Amino acid sequence: MSPLKDIILTALAPAIWGSTYLVTTQALPPDYPLTLAVLRALPAGLLLLMVTRNLPSRAWLGRTFLLGAFNFAIFWSLLFVAAYRLPGGVAATLGATQTLIVLGLSRALLGSRVSVVSILAAIAGIGGVALLVLGPAAELDPIGVAAGLGGAASMAAGTVLSRKWQPPVPALTFTAWQLTAGGLLLLPVAFVFEPALPPLTATNLAGLAWLGLIGAAATYWLWFRGVARIEPGAVSMLGLMSPLTAVLLGWLWLGQALGTLQTIGAAVLLASVWLGQVPTFTTRFINKKVIP
């Protein structure tokens, strides 16, 4: 498959993740973030396990749970802490720093070459997210900032280690392992820290079905497939499509304002995402020349 098709398919995942805010606020009961995260990850993971019928071997069990922690349990938990303690724009901007963290981890753990283009794209992407979502009255809470940066670091570690530890199974199976592990790790945390869910309505069930089947099972399959094919730094830049989609859905669906600065931010963000894919095309071109 061509690099462009790989990029487009992988970008679909974070673009769909951008619907999470709309679905959560409009279709799910409030104040149950960890419980809803469990219901998003665990049923999707178990369903995929039933489809793939392939459990991780003993050698892969530890790695699977570590990846499930980084990509889901730790990341989603810190994401919710940041969302509760910070304005949404600040949380989104802090989350965008994972693009720079991925570059550093890729260099340290994979020996990847970090180009100036990649660094500039990551910095521009953070700036684009800031223009897109930051408001003039944004406030900083130390715990919220720590959670936001910790969540970014967790996602970055999960992305890089998912590339480093490629199992001898298809991406769909790898997704099933990680979603199940992440859901199992989140389950006791949700049980201890949150009360039982109220009776769910048809709208609640539809929202959970969207987040589980599409926002978890399908999209993370696309994401981990992309991680295996595209340089981690380039993959992380595609993650910036999530805040862009969230803002556009808020504008289209909820009638939220979209001003000049946000329009400029969206343009900068898209340009940075495209710039971040340059290493992928360069690597594929070199490999094609060296290994015909």
Image (cartoon, rainbow, N blue to C red):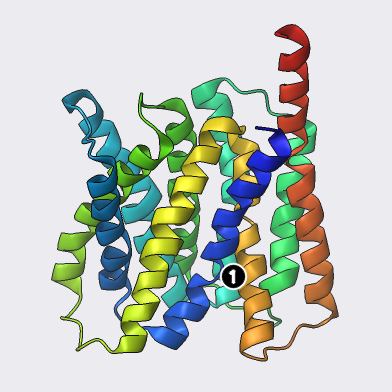
Q: Residue 122 in the image: x percent, y percent?
A: 70, 47
Crowding around mark 1 (Cα neighbors within 10 Å: few <14, some 14 to 19, many 20+) is: many
Asked if residue 234 lies left or right of residue 57, the reply is right
Asked if residue 113 lies left or right of residue 32, the reply is right
Name the residue at 61% across, 90% down. 254
Asked if residue 85 lies left or right of residue 72, the reply is right
Q: Residue 220 in the image: x percent, y percent?
A: 45, 50
Q: Which residue occupies the extreme front position in the image?
A: 51
Name the residue at 61% across, 42% down. 235
User: Residue 226, located in which quarter of the rendered image?
Assistant: top right
Question: On the rendered image, what quadrant is the C terminus found in?
Answer: top right
Asked if residue 144 lies left or right of residue 192, the reply is right
Residue 132, can we see it?
A: yes
Q: Amino acid at mark 1?
A: Val
User: Residue 15, located in which quarter of the rendered image?
Assistant: bottom right
Q: In the rendered image, which residue does mark 1 sit on?
A: 90
Q: Residue 138 in the image: x percent, y percent?
A: 62, 78
Residue 134, can we see it?
A: no
Name the residue at 48% across, 31% down. 163
Q: Residue 79 in the image: x percent, y percent?
A: 43, 64
Secondary structure under tag 1 reads: helix
Name the residue at 67% across, 67% down. 244
In this rendered view, identify the residue nearer to me: 207 or 283: 207
Question: On the rendered image, what quadrant is the N terminus found in?
Answer: top right
In this rendered view, identify the residue nearer to me: 219 or 239: 219
Rendered view: 93 above or below 137: above
